[in-house]
Every structure is written in structure tokens, then in C-alpha cells.
Amino acid sequence: MTMKESSGPLRVLQLTDPHLMAHAEGALLGVKTRDSLQAVISDVLREHGQPDLILATGDIAQDGSIDAYRVFGESLKAFSCSSAWIEGNHDHAGNLVKVAGEYNAGARHITLGGWQFVMLDSSVPGKVFGALADSELKFLEETLEQHPDLPAVVALHHHPVDIGSDWMEKIGLTNREAFWRVLDRFPQVRIVLWGHIHQEHEVERNGVHLMATPSTCIQFTSGSSKFSVENVPPGYRWFEFHDTGEFTTEVCRAKDFQFELDQNSTGY
């Protein structure tokens, strides 16, 4: 998918882990996930205006239902740009792909504004942890080989590095060595972007910026050894990419959103 160039920086919005449900009142640990997503969308429009592209990095639905994905697609009509959706561990891949197709959100490689975006499926049916199938690794390799001159953002759902939280270490990307063997061959990769961990995280590896982004619903406590949620607002990540290969990014939160979080839960 290729879209027209713009004169200013390319404005990209990452939304992740909305955990939507077919039921309109569906809640995760006390937070109504449709309401929190709407609060995030309102914050984006108020603070930044319209993006040029939206990256939705998994766990779009908590229940995997067709209805939940359609709610997401309809919610994104607040924006005038295209979006690209990838699977997380809570998603039903077949339903996501079907509805993404209805909203023209199934692109796995996007070139725009002097950058390229590679969207990977790290979900494993029936499992919380992630892995990239050989076909995904081949797609990643071939795509980067074909576009050596465009700086690249590689997006997936599961974390490909340890994040210092014991309970999440076994539910990240399990074949991360194979992933890095591919990426390390391609100097145009500037950013690896993911969701899943429901918190902000930024580190650097061999000059590549590694970034995770808060959920549009509940947040996990950073650095916690066991499951724990934190009473902080839902969030999103905003990028501005320049055709020089430079970029800026910030994590923002819908601070006006009112919610009562169940902090006594031992899972989600």
C-alpha cells in the first residue's frame, strides 16, 4: 500500500490493546474498553489533530468477536486516514482479517512519507506467548531486501526483548533470536514497535529504537514481578516522521478519562 507524500512530517498514531468486546458495556478490570478507546481518540484529535496513518498493534478484541472488530473499525472513522491492524494473543485471526478487509486495514507493508512500515503477525492460536512463523520471518526478510533505501518501522504485538517484569518474560516473543537474526542484517530498520505489555517502554539495541506503548484500556505496572495493574490513564503513541530519516515520538494519555480500576485482580 502506497499513499501520497505530504509536505510536512508524516504523522502516525499507534493504538494498541483496546480489548473490545461484542457487549457494549464490556469491561476489563472495571474499565469499559469502548469508553476508554473513545477517550483516547478524543485526546488524539484534541492534542494532535488528524494522523496520516494508524497502526493497531494487536489485542483489538478481548473476545475475538466480529462485532468487536467492527466497533473498532467504526471508531476509527473519527480519523480520515488508513489504518493497519495486526493480531495479538486475544484476537481471533480469522475474524480480525475478515473485518480488517472490510475497513481496508489489512495491509502488511506500507510506504509513506519516505518511510516503510512492516506489520507482522506474532500471534500463536490458543497461546498467550508469541512467535513468528517461518512465513512471517520470510516476509520480513523479503520486504526489507526489496526496499533497502527506506527507513523501516517493524511492528508486532509481542515484546521481542526482556522488559524487566518477571511474569511477562515467558509470554513475549519466544523465537526472538530468529527475529533479530533477520533484523540485524538490515541497517534501514530504525524502529521496532509493539504492544502487549500495557505500558510505555523504550530502549535501544544496536542503534534500533525499541518501543512499547500503553494500552487504550488498562495498564500493567512497570517492573512488577507478578501480575499487577497501575491506576494510570489509557494512552497511545504519536510519531512524526521526516523524509530525512529522523523522527520524534511521544506517549500521551487521556488524562480526563474517569474510571474505577479493579486493582485486586490476579489476571485479565
Image: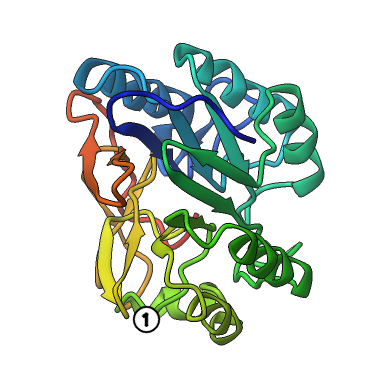
Q: Residue at x 55, y 87 (%)?
A: 177
**Residue assigned mark 1:** 166
Residue name at image x 51 percent, y 20 percent: 76
Which residue is located at x 52 percent, y 23 percent?
25
Residue 253, visible in the rendered structure: yes
Relative depth, front residue between 216 and 97: 97
Q: Name the residue nearer the viewer: 127 or 75.
A: 75
How is the model colour-coded? Answer: rainbow
Q: Nearer the viewer, residue 226 or 47?
A: 47
At 55% from the left and 25% from the top, the residue drawn is 82
Q: Is residue 123 left or right of residue 212?
A: right
Measuring from the top left, give residue 216's x and y in whole percent. 39, 38
Please rate how many residues cluster around mark 1, counting C-alpha atoms within 10 Å: few if below 14, some from 14 to 19, many from 20: some
Residue 53 image offset from top left, x and y in percent: 46, 31
The location of residue 194, given as percent across then percent down, is 45, 57
**How many labels sit on residues?**
1
Residue 103: quadrant of the picture: top right
Q: Does residue 66 appear to the left or right of 202 in the view shown?
A: right
Outermost residue to the front: 149
Q: Is residue 224 visible?
A: no
Label 1, secondary structure: give it: helix
Tell me if residue 87 comes above or below residue 165 in the rendering. Answer: above
* Residue 55: image location, x then y, percent: 49, 40
* Quarter assignment of residue 189: bottom left
Badge 1 amino acid: Asp
Of the 4 image quadrants, the one containing the N terminus is: top right
